[in-house]
């Protein structure tokens, strides 16, 4: 069993990953500045698993915070979730994104190198693929600088990590390119808790369902898709969390830097998501069709065969599970963790 540093472990994907790590018998140290999360998520992770983890409130941009972690704990590997993730905000305050996501990742890898820790799993995104590619997207397809600053930071960090591993063969780096993470732990005790108005589809739907938002705007109904609405590859957050364990287990002795898509390999349209949510949960979602959202593509879904064959990972949950679990979390926690 290993001791894993989870940066950003109090956040949505991080907290679910902590549950899976603890359940698998690993020791967990979380470093999070709580800029987009609450310590309550970690209290619940510990209550759910009946196990304890170490939490340090600190910042990946601060060498002192990182050195304190590595000097106190014998860390075997790092799962790096910490960063900012709102596409719209990244256009308003680009420097904050460059600082947290790019400088933060550099500062983290510098501290890892000082500590002699070279195993890293990085949260990347399907947004790094060139929009000219046709789905299913596979890892050999070209990437391209995303037009938004958030996506830009993800591709820059991927490229920095790639160059780092080429320069120093001690590094073992897994780039996990997430498609669209949704859902929540079956218990409904942990889940996604966005601040302010949600940008993403699933939290918007659950907030309409719970009465916090009036209606869903569906951005575009004239795409070249099955029903005119955008198609995405939604992946259950517990399946995504498990992909990190698979990456750790199967990469711990490997070297180099390699990317894996983490998606189900299946695309669902916005209308399909909305209609299925209504059916499986028995809740009506008021909606209207609106203009296309700038920067959106019609269709994006994964070829996940590399992760299945090389990481020995297999998604377990389908769209209905994702929608049931998202709603279960939201209705038990109408105001999130607050
Ligand atoms: P989240 O905001 O819930 O979690 C990120 C965590 O990092 C938060 O707890 C936040 O407080 C912490 N953090 C931010 N900056 C920090 C810093 N400088 N130092 C220490 N902690 C810091 O987001 P999430 O949805 O769990 O996403 C986790 C990672 O996955 C992010 O890197 C995100 O870009 C990436 N990702 C997310 C999605 C998605 O749709 N959720 C898709 C693709 C990639
Ligand atoms: C978005 C980001 C992407 C990021 C990902 C995960 C953009 C352009 N892309 O991806 O960079 O990696 O989130 O955080 O912001 N939709 C609606 N109404 C809504 C919200 C969304 O119709 O209120 C539609 C979108 O047009 C899209 C689908 O739902 O077709 C999914 O949207 P979303 O959840 O925001 O994810 P992505 O656009 O795939």
Image (cartoon, rainbow, N blue to C red):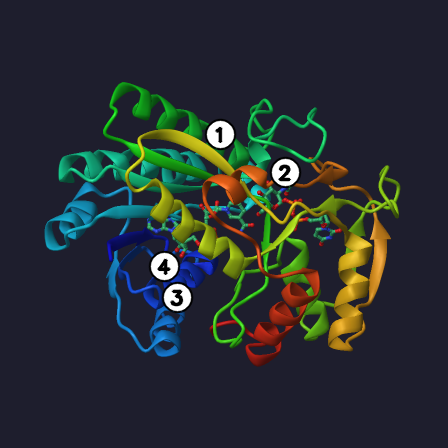
- Secondary element at tag 3: helix
What residue occupies the far left of the structure in this picture? Answer: 71
- Secondary element at tag 1: helix
- Secondary element at tag 2: loop
How many discs mark residues in the rendered view? 4
Give the camera-side residue of 221 and 314: 314
Q: Residues within 10 Å of mark 2 (few under 14, many from 20)?
A: some
Residue 116 at what x, y percent from top left? 16, 37
* Residue pictured at 60% horizontal, 32% vertical: 138
Dots 2 and 3: beta carbons under 8 Å?
Answer: no
Asked if residue 177 shows in the view, the reply is no
Give the camera-side residue of 240 and 284: 240
Q: Residues within 10 Å of mark 1 (few under 14, many from 20)?
A: many
Query: Where residue 34 is drawn, which disc sits there?
Result: 4
Q: Earlier in the sequence, mark 2 or mark 3?
A: 3
Query: Where residue 19 is drawn, which disc sits there?
Result: 3
Q: Earlier in the sequence, mark 3 or mark 4?
A: 3
Give the residue at mark 1: 155
Q: CA distance from mark 1 to mark 2?
A: 19 Å
> Does residue 77 appear left or right of residue 123 in this picture?
left
Query: Where residue 303 is drawn, which disc sits there?
Result: 2
Q: CA distance from mark 2 to mark 4?
A: 34 Å
Dots 3 and 4: beta carbons under 8 Å?
Answer: no
Q: Earlier in the sequence, mark 1 or mark 3?
A: 3
Residue 173 at what x, y percent from top left? 35, 35
* Residue pictured at 24% horizontal, 58% vertical: 1
Nearer to us of marks 1 and 2 is 2
Nearer to us of marks 3 and 4 is 3
């Amino acid at each position: 069993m290993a001791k894993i540093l989870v940066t950003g472990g109090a956040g949505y994907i991080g907290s679910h990953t902590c549950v899976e790590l603890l359940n698998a018998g690993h020791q967990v140290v979380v470093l999070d500045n709580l800029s987009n999360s609450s310590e309550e998520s970690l209290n619940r992770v510990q209550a759910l698993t009946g196990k304890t983890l170490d939490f340090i409130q600190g910042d990946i941009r601060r060498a002192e915070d990182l050195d304190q972690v590595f000097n106190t704990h014998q860390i075997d590997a790092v799962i790096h979730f910490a960063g900012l993730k709102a596409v719209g905000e990244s256009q308003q305050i680009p420097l904050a994104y460059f600082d947290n996501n790019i400088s933060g990742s550099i500062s983290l890898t510098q501290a890892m190198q000082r500590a002699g820790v070279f195993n890293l799993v990085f949260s990347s995104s399907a947004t790094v693929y060139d929009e000219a590619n046709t789905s299913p997207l596979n890892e050999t397809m070209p990437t391209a600088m995303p037009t938004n600053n958030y996506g830009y930071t993800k591709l820059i960090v991927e490229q920095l990590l790639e160059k780092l591993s080429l320069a120093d063969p001690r590094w073992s780096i897994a780039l996990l390119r997430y498609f669209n993470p949704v859902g929540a732990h079956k218990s409904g005790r942990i889940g996604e808790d966005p601040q302010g108005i949600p940008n993403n589809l699933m939290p918007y739907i659950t907030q309409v369902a719970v009465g916090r938002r009036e209606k869903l705007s569906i951005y575009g109904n004239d795409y070249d898709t099955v029903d005119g609405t955008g198609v995405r590859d939604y992946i259950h957050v517990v399946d995504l969390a498990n992909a990190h364990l698979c990456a750790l287990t199967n990469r711990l002795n490997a070297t180099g830097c390699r990317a894996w898509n983490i998606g189900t390999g299946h695309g669902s349209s916005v209308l399909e998501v909305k209609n299925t949510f209504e059916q499986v949960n028995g809740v009506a979602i008021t909606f209207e069709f609106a203009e296309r959202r700038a920067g959106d593509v019609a269709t994006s879904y994964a070829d996940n065969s590399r992760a299945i064959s090389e990481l020995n990972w297999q998604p377990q949950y389908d769209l209905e599970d994702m929608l049931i679990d998202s709603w279960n979390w939201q209705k038990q926690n109408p105001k999130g963790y607050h």
